[in-house]
C-alpha cells in the first residue's frame, strides 16, 4: 500500500474534535465544582443559621478537610466563607442561579467581592456569561468599571437608529478601553490603527460578542474615486455591517458626513439582500456629549459616537457618579 499525502484540513478535523471534547470536559468539571461549592455553602449557611456552628467551627472544618484530604485545594476557611456568601447571595434569584455554572469559580470571586450593588453583580454575571469572558477579562472589565460606565454614560446614537434598531443600544458602548494597546497619550492615527490590528483579538473582546472582523482600510469606489474605510466588521445578532472610523482628535460634527458617505457606499455596493443596513461607529479620542447630542439629534443615518481611552478610568470618579445615580434613581435606602 503506497503512502498517501493527506491534506492538512483532514487532520485538522480530528484536532477540532479533540478540542471540542476537551472544552466539553472542562465545562462538565466546572459545573460539578460550582454545584459542590453551592452545596457546601448551603450546608454551612444552614448550620450557622441554627447557631450550631460559629466562626471557629468553620476554621475547624477547613483543618478537618485538609487532614482527611491532604493536598486538596480550594477548601481553606476563607474559601468556605466565600461558598456560604455565594449561596446566600444567589439563593433568592432563580433567574441568575441558572447562569452560575457557566462561570469559573475565580470569576465568581471577582464578581462577589468587588460588586457594590445587587444590580452590579447581576450585570457582570449576565454579561460575562453572554460574552463568554475569561476570568482575566472579568477582572479587566471590572477594573474598567464597565457597569458604572454603562449606567452613568449610555451610548450616544442617532435618533433614527434608536427608532429603527433599538436593539443596537446593547451592542455598543459609550467608551472603549484600549489600554492593552500600550499607546502613549499622544499618538498618531496610523499608530492607533496598526496597534488595533496587532491586538485584534483583544479589540474584538472589548467590542463585544458577535463582532466579526471583515477588513482594514476596506476599499470603497464611488464615481471613479477610491476611498478606504478604517475598519469593517459584521455583527451577527444585528445582521449588518459595522463601519468604524478612527479619530485621534475630539469629535467634530463634520466627521458624521464622512461616515454617512461610507455607510451609503456599503449599503449600495456591499450589503447582501438579506442583511440590514450598515451601522457606523465614530471612535474618537474625546467628545463633548452636548455637541454629540446636537449632531445626532436630526441625523437620519444609523450612526453612533463613542470615545476610546488608552488609560484605565478613574475608579473613584466613576464610583462617585454611580453613587449619585443610585441616590437619584434608586433611592438613598437602596444605595446604602
Image (cartoon, rainbow, N blue to C red):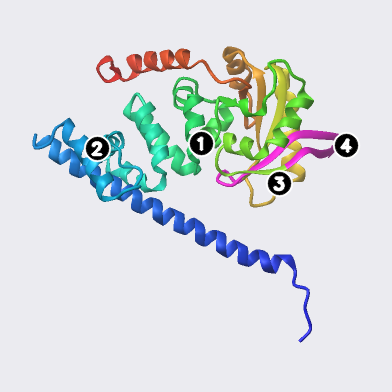
SS category of the residue bearing label 2? helix
- The label on residue 187 is none
**Mark found first going from the N terminus, 2 or 1:** 2
Left or right of residue 215: residue 288: left
* Mark 3 lies on residue: 271
SS category of the residue bearing label 1? helix
Q: Residue at coordinates 14% horizontally, 40% vertically from top-left?
A: 46
Magenta segment? 215-239
- Mark 1: give few (<14), some (14-19) or many (20+) Cα within 10 Å: few
Q: x, y percentage for residue 29? A: 40, 54
Which mark lies nearer to you, 3 or 1?
A: 1
Which mark lies nearer to you, 1 or 4?
A: 1
- Front one among 150 and 19: 19
Q: Residue at coordinates 51% horizontally, 25% vertically from top-left?
A: 144
Q: Distance between the residues labelled 1 and 4?
A: 48 Å
Q: Distance between the residues labelled 2 and 1?
A: 24 Å
* Mark 2 lies on residue: 84
**Mark found first going from the N terminus, 1 or 4:** 1
* Mark 1 lies on residue: 136
Left or right of residue 269: residue 316: left
* Mark 4 lies on residue: 223
- Mark 3: give few (<14), some (14-19) or many (20+) Cα within 10 Å: some
Q: Residue at coordinates 49% horizontally, 20% vertically from top-left?
A: 153
SS category of the residue bearing label 3? loop
SS category of the residue bearing label 4? loop
Above or below, 184 relative to 48: above
User: In this view, which residue lies farthest toward the bottom?
Assistant: 1
Amino acid at each position: 500500500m503506497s503512502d498517501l499525502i493527506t491534506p492538512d484540513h483532514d487532520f485538522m478535523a480530528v484536532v477540532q474534535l479533540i478540542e471540542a471534547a476537551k472544552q466539553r470536559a472542562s465545562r462538565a468539571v466546572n459545573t460539578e465544582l460550582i454545584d459542590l461549592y453551592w452545596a457546601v455553602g448551603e450546608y454551612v449557611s444552614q448550620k450557622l443559621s441554627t447557631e450550631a456552628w460559629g466562626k471557629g467551627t468553620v476554621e475547624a472544618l477547613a483543618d478537618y478537610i485538609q487532614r482527611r484530604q491532604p493536598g486538596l485545594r480550594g477548601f481553606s476557611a476563607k474559601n468556605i466563607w466565600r461558598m456560604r456568601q455565594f449561596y446566600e447571595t444567589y439563593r433568592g434569584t432563580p433567574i441568575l442561579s441558572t447562569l452560575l455554572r457557566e462561570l469559573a469559580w475565580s470569576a465568581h470571586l471577582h464578581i462577589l467581592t468587588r460588586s457594590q450593588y445587587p444590580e452590579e453583580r447581576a450585570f457582570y454575571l449576565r454579561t460575562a456569561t453572554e460574552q463568554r469572558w475569561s476570568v482575566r477579562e472579568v477582572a479587566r472589565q471590572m477594573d474598567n468599571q464597565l457597569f458604572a460606565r454603562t449606567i452613568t454614560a449610555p451610548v450616544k446614537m442617532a435618533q433614527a437608529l434608536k427608532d429603527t434598531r433599538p436593539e443596537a443600544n446593547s451592542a455598543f458602548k459609550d467608551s472603549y478601553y484600549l489600554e492593552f494597546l500600550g499607546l502613549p497619550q499622544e499618538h498618531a492615527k496610523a499608530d492607533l490603527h496598526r496597534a488595533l490590528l496587532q491586538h485584534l483579538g483583544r479589540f474584538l473582546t472589548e467590542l463585544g460578542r458577535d463582532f466579526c472582523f471583515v477588513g482594514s482600510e476596506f476599499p470603497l469606489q464611488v464615481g471613479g474615486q477610491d476611498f478606504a474605510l478604517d475598519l469593517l466588521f459584521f455583527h451577527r445578532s444585528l445582521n449588518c455591517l459595522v463601519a468604524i472610523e478612527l479619530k485621534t482628535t475630539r469629535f467634530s460634527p463634520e466627521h458624521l458626513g464622512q461616515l454617512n458617505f461610507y455607510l451609503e457606499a456599503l449599503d449600495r455596493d456591499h450589503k447582501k439582500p438579506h442583511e440590514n443596513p450598515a451601522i457606523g461607529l465614530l471612535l474618537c479620542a474625546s467628545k463633548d456629549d452636548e455637541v454629540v447630542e446636537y449632531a445626532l439629534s436630526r441625523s437620519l443615518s444609523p450612526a453612533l459616537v463613542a470615545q476610546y481611552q488608552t488609560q484605565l478610568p478613574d475608579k473613584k470618579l466613576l464610583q462617585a457618579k454611580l453613587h449619585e445615580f443610585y441616590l437619584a434613581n434608586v433611592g438613598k435606602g437602596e444605595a446604602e
